[in-house]
Amino acid sequence: MIDNRKNSAIKKALIKIYNDKAKNYGEDIRALGWNSIRSQEIRFKVLMEIGDLQKRSILDIGCGFGDLYGYLLKKRTGFKKYLGIDINPKMIAIAKRRYPEANFKVGDILENFPNVHFDYVLASGIFAFEIPNWEDHCLLVLRQMYNLCNIGVSVNFLSYFTQGEKVANANYVHPARIIHFIGSNISRKFVLRHNYKINDFTVYIYKDKFE
């Protein structure tokens, strides 16, 4: 059950985090919480390895500046349809300016989102920061991402097993917590990827064709 008041507070907190970063870094990759384009593209590559994206529809949750869209084009994935959504209007304005041909919208999949399904639902970095009621919010979002997909969900997290100094206000998650919830409440068809960056992991959640 979605608590609109809590969700509104979470959105305000997240928008403030990214707007504060944008004040410091402008349209630089650091405004999105990443250290480098290479680091971001490694995450994108793993997200995309959920399956064959050719002639598939893609929903990009928390699309930011539209960087995943640009990467999909760069890698010639041959996707059929793309929609990028973000709760932050400033991010969407930049994404539209960068990629005027693409479909970007201000939106929240937990509030008044149309009942439209996509083959794959992807999200990079949307769970990276500490916010009020993080775990409840994360689980609601994962459920809704799964509800909106036809084939699967691909999403990443900062890992509890990160070595060295950790970033302030970042949220490092034990993979077992996420896997336990997914397996118990969403789908028993999932894959955990913790083999590409020591401070990061990605989960693929698949729809069961017999559902």
Image (tube, rainbow, N blue to C red):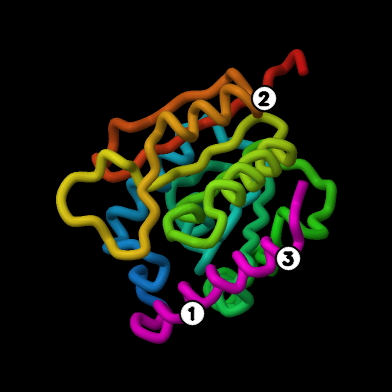
Residue type, numbered disc 1:
Asn
Can residue 124 be found in the magenta stretch? no
**In the rendered image of this protein, does residue 51 appear above or below residue 136?**
above
Segment colored magenta: 1-26
Q: Nearer the viewer, mark 2 or mark 3?
A: 3
Tell me, for residue 59, which label it has, or none.
none
**Residue pointed to by mark 2:** 207
Q: Specify whether residue 3 is painted magenta.
A: yes
Residue nearest the observer in this picture, 166 or 64: 166
Residue 46 screen position, x and y as percent = 40, 38
Q: Which of marks 3 and 1 is nearer the N terminus?
A: 3
The nearer-to-camera label among 3 and 1 is 3
Residue carrying label 3:
5
> Could you say where residue 115 lies in the image, as x and y percent from the top left?
84, 47
Within 10 Å of disc 3 (Cα), the crowding (few <14, some 14-19, many 20+) is few
Which secondary structure is most common in the magenta stretch? helix
Quadrant of the rendering where the C terminus is positioned: top right
Q: Which of marks 2 and 1 is in front?
A: 1
Q: In which quarter of the image is residue 54?
A: top right
Residue 148 is situated, as x and y percent measured from the top left of the image, at 73, 41
Compared with 92, 145 (above or below) is above
Return the mark for residue 19: 1
CA separation, marks 2 and 3? 30 Å
| Residue 56 appearing in the image | no
